[in-house]
Each structure stands twice: as structure tokens, then as C-alpha cells.
């Protein structure tokens, strides 16, 4: 599953992402984002079933 999300803000070591597609707020470590991340950037998140 791929979700589009916008970086809403950076809190410490975490990027807080908002997704209109599934109306959810997602917190991920900034280190998981390739390159620099800035407020307002759009990211494609890939969610995989690990089971």
C-alpha cells in the first residue's frame, strides 16, 4: 500500500506526517527519510505486511 503524506512539522527526531487519503497523523523518525525533509514536502509512504 502506498500513501501520500505531507510533512506537517518536525518534533525532535520525528517527522509528523498528515495524510488526507486515510485521515491519519503518522510519526516517523527523520532518519527514515532520504535526503532533507522540510515542512510541506509530499512523501510517498510504502506500507508492507511483514507477516
Image: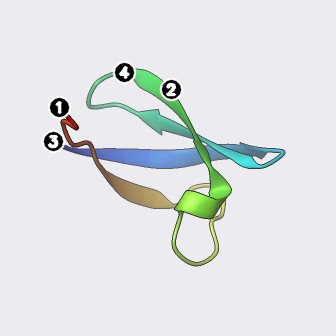
Residue carrying label 2: 25
Judged from the image, the secondary structure of the residue bearing numbered disc 3 is: loop
- Image: 41 above or below 9: below
- Image: 37 above or below 30: below
Query: Which quadrant would the N terminus be assigned to in this image?
Result: top left
Residue found at x 22% / y 38%: 50
The reply to whether the C-beta atoms of the residues labelled 4 and 1 are less than 8 Å apart is no
* Neighbour tally class for label 1: few under 14, some 14-19, many 20 plus, Cα within 10 Å: few
Residue found at x 26% / y 31%: 21
Residue in the foreground of this view, choosing between 5 and 13: 13
Q: Is residue 49 left or right of residue 7?
A: left
Residue carrying label 1: 51
Cα separation between marks 2 and 1: 24 Å
Residue 10, x across and y down, in percent = 74, 47
Judged from the image, the secondary structure of the residue bearing numbered disc 4 is: loop
* Neighbour tally class for label 4: few under 14, some 14-19, many 20 plus, Cα within 10 Å: few
Cα separation between marks 3 and 2: 16 Å
4 vs 3, front mark? 3
Q: Is residue 3 left or right of residue 17?
A: left
Residue carrying label 4: 23
Rendered image: mark on residue 1: 3
Q: Earlier in the sequence, mark 3 or mark 2?
A: 3
4 vs 1, front mark? 1
Residue located farthest toward the front when viewing the structure as drawn: 51
Cα separation between marks 3 and 1: 15 Å
Cα separation between marks 4 and 1: 25 Å
Quarter where residue 11 is shown: top right
3 vs 1, front mark? 1
Q: Is residue 42 left or right of residue 45?
A: right
2 vs 1, front mark? 1
Amino acid at each position: 500500500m502506498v500513501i501520500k503524506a505531507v510533512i506537517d512539522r518536525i518534533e525532535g527526531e520525528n517527522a509528523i506526517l498528515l495524510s488526507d487519503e486515510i485521515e491519519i497523523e503518522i510519526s516517523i523518525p527523520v532518519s527514515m527519510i532520504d535526503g532533507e525533509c522540510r515542512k510541506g514536502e509530499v512523501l510517498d509512504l510504502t506500507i508492507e505486511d511483514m507477516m
